Structures are given as C-alpha cells and as structure tokens.
Amino acid sequence: MVDGPIVFAGLMPHAPILVPGVGRERLAEVTATAQAMATVSRHAVAAQPDTVVLVSPHSPRQPGAFGIWQTRKLRGSLEMFGSPEDRVDLPLDLAFAEQLEAAAARRELRTWRITGQPLDHGAVVPLCYLVAAGWKGPTVILSLNYTGDGGLDELGEAIAATAQELHRRTAIIASGDMSHRLTASAPCGFHSEAHRFDETFIALLRQGAFHDVQRIDASLQEVAAEDVADSTTVALAASRYRTDGHAVLSYEGPFGVGYGVAILYEPTEAGLQDAATEAADKIASRFADLPAVARDAVEAELRGGSKTAPGRAAGELTARHGVFVTVRTDQGGLRGCRGSLQPVEGDLVQETWHNAVATAFHDYRFPPVQAAELPRLRFSVTVLGELEAVASPEALDPATYGVLVTAADGRKGVLLPAIAGIDSVEQQLAIARRKAGIAPDEWIGIQRFKARSFKEPHFVEDGG
C-alpha cells in the first residue's frame, strides 16, 4: 500500500528533440527513450495524483533560493524549437505552491516566485508526455538554486510535508539530462571522461543506491556538464529515498547527450493495479512464446490495460537480450518494426512487451495500430546476440549477421539479418546508413550481431 502522500516519483529527460513535432524523423533514433517517457507518464497518471510536482533545471534560477512558478496557468510551448503546436496549458495548484513556501521557510530554505514568462523546455518536454498520457490536473513547477548551494533534501522534505498537510496525492517528476559531452557534436563538446558520470548515475539508480547520487564526484559532474543529479535528488528526498518499484527504463546518448528514464518510486496499491494483473500467474518459458507476448501487449495497450507484462518469465526467457518486434499485415506489408539493441528490461518477456508497444504505436513511419486491424496482423520477435565490432565489411554476411553502423557524431542505423531481398554486404550497409541519415562517404563504425527470429504461423518475416 502507499505509505504517505507521494504516490509516484519518476525521472524524464527534457531535450526538445524527444517531442515528435521537434524530433520528427530523428525521433526514430531515440525510440527507447520516447517509449520509456510514455511509460513513466502512464504510470504517473495511473497513480491517480491530485497534484503533479515537476522540478526543472532550466527554469529561472537565483543563487541560494528555489523558484516556485506562481502563474495562474502554467503555459509554454516548443515554438522556439520549431514546433509551436507542442504546447502545455495546465492549472497551477496555487494552494500547494503557497503551502510549499511556508514548508520551505520552516526548513530555513529561501524561495522566490517566478511570474510573467512562459515555461522553459525543461518543464514543457516532460509535461508534453504527461499531457499525452491524460494529465490535465493541478500542477506545480519548481526551479533549483545554484549547484552546490545545498538544500535539496530539505526541499524534497518540504514537498512531502506540503502534500501531507493538504492531503494531496502527489506525483513528482525530476526533469534532467545526463552528460552533455558524449561526442564531438555534443552541445558542450567532447570529453573522454563524461561517459563515466552517466554509467555511475544509471548504475546507482538500477541498484536503488539512491543516497549515493549526492556522493558522485563533483569534478565528474562538472566534466559531464549534467543537469540531472540535483532535480533527481529532490524527487528522491520527497519520496524519502524509498526504492519500491524502482526501475531504469532506458538509457541512450545518440546525439551526444545522455537521456535516462526511470521510475524512482512506485508503491503497490490495490486500487492502481490493472485488471490484467489477474493473469499474473501466466508463465512464458520458450522463445516460441514471444510472438504471443507481443500480440498480448498490443491488445492490452488498445484496451487501456496492463502497461507491463502481467505474466512472468521462466526458463530461457529469464535471460536478458536486445529484442526487435516486427509487425506485418497478413498480405506481407510492413506495419512496424522497433526494438532495443541492448536489454533494457529484466527479462525477455518484459523486453518483448515494451518493444511490441513501441512497434505498434510509436513507429513514426506508420499510423498507430487500430483494434480493427489486429486479426489481420502478424507478429515476429527477433532476439539479438552480443554486438561485435568488426574491422572491415569483409567480416559481414547479411544472411548470418545483422549490422549496426555508427557515425562519428553518434547517429546509428541498424538492420536485422536474413532480410528477404538483401543479398549483399553493400546493400546491407547502404540501407543501414540511409536509416540513420549517414551519407555514403561518411566514416562509420561497424558492429555485427547474430539473431534468432520467432514468428506467428504463416508470417513472412522481414526486419523492418
């Protein structure tokens, strides 16, 4: 059961390119991040909060003080990034904002009121996902003080106290991007040590070692040029550093900036459980079961049911691998193909479930799947082996190996093995380059992988 007024805590990145109207075709390069942000948003809304509190590192700052937005309507858009249609317009929870000022003052924290300006992208991007998941209720947005000023734990405690005093079920979202220096084309340039911050931060979240987030070497944080640690600390403190339901849903850095998405706290409450959890004793144990898992995932999404696989993995499906899900019509036409090169979930059932949802509803080459189509669709699941770097194209064979090509600035293109009509290495590399927007004369790193595919009956397989 929920113990206290904080009913959910999550972490989402805020790069505008993660929103379809800005990212457009490049959103395909961060499918895992977009899918994970949608998952966090659905879980936050499913927790039935009365108020959402969001901490944005890009909201206006003052030294030694935390900002609290105090405008009757919280409005903002991504117009400056070329997408004015991506906008939010949410009511301020004024009572919460005012009570939070008092709770902060009792903890000797200074606050100030932010007025008279539109929301920053650090708030707008996560809120776009929350609104898409159905959120339209009272919202509070906070800014941080300067790095090193302290008071992060106390602000989290003040948020929890305010929620308690007002009897508000509250979801808190930390907005933040990790290293901004992963590649030469990254916003802050390249630093060879920047990746270590991301690896450390993600490992701590996976382990539930939440108190150690504040103990990450300050010099490493500076090298990384990150803006995620402080906002995450506030959210962790608000939920009292509890680890119930914590999970890292994705991590990517294709544009030189690390994007991490996580559920930080999600307590169990009977009233929040999906009807689909009645099938929690369902067991999948064979690779051949995975296409049925994929179909179940799409059906559940269409009926608004379980957001995670209600059954459990056993046998060979307890392993962790990258997975691609392909959906085709019964006439052989491609309807969607999305996946993960490296495992994100804890087992192959969950990996397949989440990638099936991405394929059916977030492959932006196609409109979302409709319920009426399901009887005419066929599902295939490809389980990937380990990635191996190769020195030259001579080590490739499109019948045996899939390929991942990576440009110097992080753009990636992937193609599965044994695709009908792709008979040469030259074809395979050309298509992989084209999918990533990499010119024929650009340098690429090449990795290969083996894969095993499993399909529904009478399904002609294709790698998307």
Image (spheres, rainbow, N blue to C red):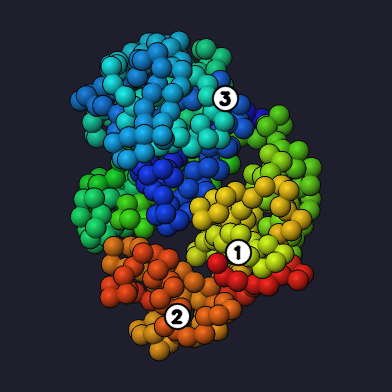
Type of amino acid under label 3: Pro
Q: Position of residue 118 (x, y in %)?
A: 31, 24
Mark 2 surroundings within 10 Å by alpha-carbon count, few (fewer than 14), some (14 through 19), many (20 or more) = few
Q: Is residue 316 above or below residue 182?
A: below
Closer to the camera in the image, 329 or 296: 329
What residue is shown with label 3?
Answer: 49
Closer to the camera in the image, 171 or 207: 171
Structural distance between the alpha carbons of marks 1 and 3:
39 Å
**Element type where label 2 sits in the image:** helix
What residue is shown with label 2?
Answer: 427
Q: Where is the N terminus found, in terms of image quarters?
A: top right
91 sits left or right of 418 in the view? left
* Residue 170 visible from this viewpoint: no
**Element type where label 1 sits in the image:** strand
Q: Where is residue 45 in the image (x, y as percent from the top left)?
A: 58, 31
Picture residue at 34% right of the left edge, 68% below the top: 438
